Image (cartoon, rainbow, N blue to C red):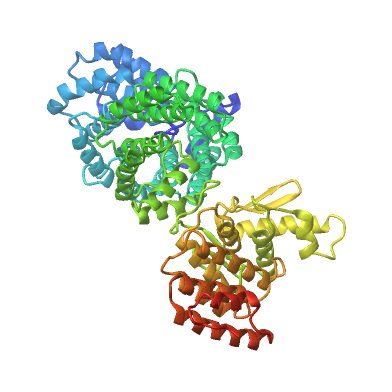
Amino acid sequence: MRGFACKEAMAPRAPPCEQNNREEVVTVTAGTPPDAASALTAPWQLEEAGDSLVTRLLQACGQLRESPLEAARTAEQLFPEARQREDLAPWLALVTAICGRIETLSDFHPLDPFIAFFDERRSALDAPEAVLAQIDVTTFGALVFRQPDHPRIAELAERSEAIFQGDQMPSADDFVRLSAANYLMIHRIWCGDLTGADALHRRMAALRESAGDVYSRLLCHSMSSMILRLYLRYDQCAREIEQGLALARQTGFHAWDSQFHMQGAMLALTLENTEEARRWLEPMGELAPPEHSMDRAGYHYCLGWLHSLEEDLPLAIRHAEESVQLAQRSGGVFPQAVTHVGLGQLYLEQRRISAGLYHFVRARRVGRRMQSSRPVQFIRGLLDAHLAFRMGMHRRGCRALQQALAIGREEYYLNFPWWRGQLVAGLCVKALEEDIETEYVRTLIRTRRLRLPDHTHPPANWYWPLEVQVLGVRSVLLDGADPGLSRQLFNLLLMLACLGDQEGWVSRERLIDSLWPDSEGDQGQRALDTSIHRLRKQLGSERLIGSRPGRVRLDLGLCRVDYRELLACLDKEQPDVRDIGFMLEVMDCLNKGHANPWLPPVDTLQHRIAARILSLARGPFRGHEQVPQWLETLAGHLPASEHVWQGLIRHHLEQGMHSDALETWERCCRALDQHRGVEPSPATRALLREIPGRRVV
């Protein structure tokens, strides 16, 4: 379907004045007529005189651009009679029917007799090379949609590649060559060969710019936008969509407009921007007629995706069920697999396990018909892992996750239909915790800007797009590099990092009072809005800086802030050794840096950290081999803290290390005298009474 394949929906009928002038406009601006009838029929050597079948076939061929579905139906009706002939009439019917069905993405079941005819008669066909090229490329397109498991599909793919490259039939017209490239690209995408599809896209772009056929150029723009979306080249994808729509406006040929709307919607859904996706999808309901089954399936598929992101499961399921039915009605193979996976995922979210598994099985069966079902295996594997983890089957979830992510790494999958960031982010947490495909997972987090799920402790090797250090020496890193923020934007970001509540929200008034204290009226509000816009632009993400009436926030699921991480460690019920190491690193940073006006005083933070580590050393980590090292580090940072010295002396005594306890006592006396001019308290002296034969004065 056009979101799944190469086209989105039929264009709306142009106003009468535009219809009357369309051919003239296209001829003038693009240098070619709006249809390919002349290109298709010129080499066919069919005479109309007295031959009504040929006349009707040529008329159907001439309708391909204005009424492609009618042209296909006419060719299908004429085919039983035409196939009895020995001339090229049945082959022209084949080309016309397949082209019309692919252009409308309506119903591919009627193409089965043409494919059977090709299998039976192609080897003995004697025709001009231009005709053979059209037949082979067109039949390859039919197999991609209808019979991807056909035994000759690899042969026809190779033949189409040669035609596109010009190795065979160097004089082939642009329409045939670019059609070959587009069918090859769809085939490679559906088989999971995104690298091959991307390479083909790059070669196709050069030919597209010199092509005169408007139809082919628009199709190429739509296919380019698809592969760019799959590779997460957001700006380039948006540019292809804009160029395609601009060419349509320039030429008056709007048959592919809905393709660009669909790709725009999918790009927005990939970014989980439901508001923008809805703006792209709103025209789709009117653009895709009911008989265009695959178009309608794509439309409902995207709506299901949209409502799933909005967590409206009942409405998402309704659209997903409709997309499955329409995909089955269309006869297209890969879209059936994709729609089954989408619906199965929603059923699992609704805890309808048996229904979800049923659709996964259907997707697997359909996927086996593809020459390679790796995209389906990848998506299915992620969802299997998600289900297993939800059901408490940890080992099974890890196995499924390992298999899926191995495919993703090998094929460099960064995107797939029905992407749901929170689900994938949760699986990435599991993968990093279990050391599964770590580098690929971190790449996925980085390129997709995956947000750490709420209430989830981040793995040590989680990738943070933005890192803000406010403790000690202040710094900001975006993907490991300094984003070069101005002083004002730098301070705004630091305030958001320091002052936010548990979800990161800070009142606008507080920001304005601190950064623009002399502003009057709405001047401060405008200055803040401008700064937020600039900060988002320099950080390259709208999502990093959130806004709602009266408040602004830094999204802590996409940003690592050392102060926030410190607070989490201090409040953590079951900290581990890494948490203590981090708190000691913070102590070192605080000693090296300067006071931060938006944080508690440095000594307050240091004593809070020391109290927490002392508590842990006396509690769950009592007897741990690293306790002496932790306490010695604290004593180095806080030599005037008698509580730290008490903790270190007590630890030596509990371990029976009396000489070490005495040596620590002596250091404690010197430190307290040097830094505070006092002697140890009676409580500290009392600790040494536990040493046999030792009398403390």
Quarter residue 360 falls in: top left
Q: Residue furthest front?
A: 693
Is there any visible trace of residue 53 in the rendered image?
Answer: yes
Front-most of 570 and 188?
A: 570
Front-most of 378 and 55?
A: 378
Q: Is residue 476 above or below residue 80?
A: below
Q: Is residue 65 above or below residue 273?
A: above
**Quadrant in which the C terminus is drawn:** bottom right
Q: Which residue is drawn at the image coordinates 32% and 18% (left, top)? A: 109
Q: Is residue 561 left or right of residue 255?
A: right
Q: Position of residue 134 (x, y in %)?
A: 27, 32
Q: Position of residue 555 (x, y in %)?
A: 60, 52
Quarter residue 162 falls in: top left
Q: Position of residue 395 (x, y in %)?
A: 32, 41
**Quadrant in which the N terminus is drawn:** top left
Quarter residue 695 falls in: bottom right
Q: Residue furthest right?
A: 521
Q: Is residue 656 left or right of residue 613?
A: left
Q: Which residue is drawn at the image coordinates 55% and 85% (left, top)? A: 667
Is there any visible trace of residue 66 in the rendered image?
Answer: no
Q: Is residue 159 above or below residue 591?
A: above
Q: Position of residue 269 (x, y in %)?
A: 52, 39
Q: Residue furthest left?
A: 124
Q: Is residue 498 above or below residue 369?
A: below
Q: Is residue 193 left or right of residue 516?
A: left
Q: Which residue is drawn at the image coordinates 56% and 75% (left, top)? A: 687
Image label count:
0
Q: Is residue 27 left or right of residue 377?
A: right
Q: Which residue is drawn at the image coordinates 61% and 38% (left, top)? A: 275
